[in-house]
Every structure is written in C-alpha cells, then in structure tokens.
Image: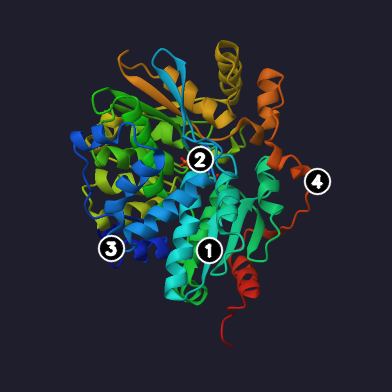
Amino acid sequence: MKYVSTRGSAPVLDFEGVLLAGLAEDGGLYVPQEWPAFSAAELRAMRGLSYVEIAERVMRPFLGSAISDADFARIVRDSYETFDHRAVTPLKQLDSNFWLLELFHGPTLAFKDVALQLLGRLFDHVLTRRGERVTIVGATSGDTGSAAIEACRDRAAIDIFILHPKGRTSEVQRRQMTSVLSSNVHNIALEGTFDDCQDQVKAMFNDPAFRARQNLSAVNSINWARIMAQIIYYIAAGVALGAPDRRIAFSVPTGNFGNVYAAYAAKQTGLPVEKLIVGSNRNDILTRFFRSGEMKIEGVEPSLSPSMDIQVSSNFERLLFDLLDRDGALVADTMKGFRAAGSFKVGDNQLGRASALFAAHRIDDTETKAVIRAVHGETGEILDPHTAVGVGAGRAISLDPDIAVVALACAHPAKFPDAVEAATGIRPALPPRLADLFEREERVAVLPNDLATVQDYISEKTGRKEAV
Ligand SMILES: Cc1ncc(COP(=O)(O)O)c(C=O)c1O
Ligand SMILES: N[C@@H](CCOP(=O)(O)O)C(=O)O
C-alpha cells in the first residue's frame, strides 16, 4: 500500500512512512493511492466477529508489509483490552431505526481512544525496532489531547507536547491532560483558539529544520493512521446492523472532519453508506459549505460542545482531493488561497458530488440542550453535548424510513457535566478510576500564540536545540 499527499509534491510513502511523517512535506495530508476493497461477501463474513477480529481484517491491507501479522494481532488485542466494554464500540437502539454508536468506553472517555490506543502502540513498536525517538506535537480542543497523552505517557521513544486553547476546554478535559505528570508529557495552554493551536502545529511541520531536528510526528487526524483506525467502527456497526444487505446512514458530530472522513473512507473500501450527516454546532462552517459550496472562515465562538469549536477542518482537504479528481496541484492552490483569503468555493459539479453523499445540519446550544433533555426523557440515556449535536442533526435530516441511522456518541457525558446538568438537572459522575481527578496536581505551561516561543519551549524540553 502506497500513500500520496493531497498536495501532490511530497514523496510517496508506505504505511510506516506515513505513520511517522504525520503531515506530508508539501503541507498536504496522506491518503491511500488506491482504496483496498471489501466485497459484499467479505463484509457479510465479518458479521459475528469480535471488534478485534474485524479491526485486524480491515486494517491489514492498509499496512502493507510494515508490521508482521503476529505483531499486529498482539498490538490490536492489547489496544482494545483497555476498553471498559467487551464490544469496544457497542450499539444502542434509541428508536425503531435510530441507533447510538458508543465510542467512549476507552481510558479517556472519548472516541479518540479508539485510534490513539492503537497509535501509541504502533509508534512504540516501530520506533523500538528503528532505535529512534520522536517528538510528537499535537493540537487539541479537548479530547485528542488526553487520549494522546494516555497513549504515549511513559513511552521511552516519545516526547509529547499537546497544545490546548487556554480556558476553552471543559475543566474535566483540561485536568485529564494536565494531571498527567510523566516526564515525557508536556501540556501547553496556548493563548488562542483551537485553530491557533492547529496552525502552530502545522507551522512546526512546515519548518523543515525544526521538523528534522525534533524528528516530529503527529497524533492528530492529519496522521493517516488515526483515520485508518476510525474506519473500523463504521464497518463493525454497519455489518452488525445487517450491511451490506441493509441501508445505513451515519450522523457524525463534526469539527476537524476526521471522524466523518473515516466514514467516507469506510465507504470507499466497500461499506454501502446511504448518507453521511455532518452535525455542526454554532461554528457551522461545514454546514454552510455543504449548502453553498463556499468554505468561508468566520470567528470561532465558544459553545456547549467545545471540542467542535473549530473553523479550519483539517481533514476536509482529504475530501477536497477526491472532489478535485486527485489533482494535487489544484488542491495546493486552493488551500493556499484559503489561507490567504479565508475562503474558497467549489464548482457546482463538486458541490453536487459532495451533496450526493453528505448532508449537514447546525444545532445551536439551545437545541443541544433540548436534544439532551428529550433523549433523556424518551429513553433514559444521557448524551454529552457533542453526541447531542449528532443526534439532533440525524433527526433533522429526512431520509427514507427504511434507512438505519447511526449517530456517533463521541464522548462520555461526565466530560461535560455543566452542559448536561443545565439540560437535565443531573450531574453525571466520572467513573471510579477518575473520581479523584479534581484533587490531582496539574502541570501546564501557559504560552502566547507565537510560533518562536512555542518552538523554543519544545527545544528546551527535548534538549534538541539549534546549533549556534
Ligand atoms: C467529543 C467530540 N465530538 C466530536 C468531535 C469532532 O470530531 P472530528 O474533529 O473528527 O470532526 C470531537 C473532536 O474531534 C470530539 O472530541
Ligand atoms: N476535537 C478534537 C480536535 C482535534 O481533532 P483531531 O481529530 O484532528 O485530533 C480534539 O478533541 O482535540
């Protein structure tokens, strides 16, 4: 399996190369040169298999010869043993043909664990064999950070630096990151937004000298391995509900577009998907795009679903690459224009193709609380505010009644107790292993939104400084 950059001018790499590279050298994102394909018979044969068995089968073609079957089987098994639920990502029925796919049973209570538990082990395996050490830099609006830290803490071959927007995550999210005191873990509270954090991370990758000196790697969904691991739960849920012999749609609360892009990737590998519903909060750049064809940045506003307070959705570039018929130079031009002008527009042809698969809907904070309240009243289930955006969008988009709609439950409600309490009057409790979270010591560096300052901080901590 070979991977190409969405901007067309970075080296073509194998799986190990894209795992370690993160962002491509031309600023693009890696995608498979060709999609592996699962036939209807192969999908049917996955029914009844465990999550781990499906994960091994689906990811195998993406790996090429990078990792032996036996090593990969062990890595996958160990990754999902850390989950509290035997099914790893269980389905729960909310209504006659409406389902919740619970993705929050991992160590840090959000869907990020599904990919990052695997990624941490893949890094460890590959780096140990190569005798290398990497510096991971990541941006988080709240959930990627703690999942990445949990996956990488105390690993000898990794230093990890996570940038979060100061004061813009929930307190539980912040403490889950800053209370990890392992010597290889470094939390940075950036004075800015998540988009600023993500810009800093990309700028570090786009600085060749810094990138080489630190041996940078990524844990955000710019890293192809993140997307690969997220494809599994779409296929597992699809076949459990009867795919390919049943019509399925997914409703995905969306920020950086990684999760819904993984659903798109699952479709490219053969899973029949009728519709992908993109749920936005008040930061609705994606909903506006799918209605008009114009991607236009407006100021980001804090919302009840802070992990989705994002304007520039990294993974949209992967979809754009396909919409522009995999013309890397055109993607590079479009992204350059987007950075300079804050907007770009696709033609009717591209919008038509995108709209054939994607629908989008915005749910504001008042609606988010109404969805949490309504679902609790109807079913007794307590949704977190991000999940509520997905459920609300899934209910708002009208589809044929025989299509099973699966809404992704991306976080445990206890990560956002204030929003849940405001909606239901109930303050959800953290699981016992996190019960003392509010008593734990925190360690975090507050830094201005300035690239040189952030780079100096990282160089100081890793000891990999510029030669003078
Ligand atoms: C709980 C939760 N829901 C939804 C999202 C949005 O997912 P994505 O960024 O993959 O679009 C995030 C952040 O990634 C999140 O943490
Ligand atoms: N919502 C995310 C933002 C980063 O997304 P990623 O999927 O690219 O890691 C978060 O919780 O940090």
Residue carrying label 1: 136
Marks 4/3: CA–CA distance: 46 Å
Is 231 located above or below residue 214 in the figure?
above
Q: Which amino acid, mark 1?
A: Ile
Residue carrying label 4: 439
- The image position of residue 227, as x and y in percent, is 39, 48
Residue carrying label 3: 65
Marks 4/2: CA–CA distance: 25 Å
The image quarter containing residue 304 is: top right
For label 2, count other residues whose C-alpha is less than 10 Å away and answer few (under 14), some (14-19) or many (20+).
many
Marks 1/2: CA–CA distance: 20 Å
> What residue is drawn where x is 42% and y is 61%?
22
Q: Which amino acid, mark 2?
A: Phe
Q: What residue occupies the far bottom of the structure in this picture?
A: 468
Q: In terms of secondary structure, where does tag 2 sit?
A: loop
Marks 3/1: CA–CA distance: 24 Å
Q: Note whether residue 339 is visible.
A: no
The earlier-in-sequence mark between 2 and 3 is 3
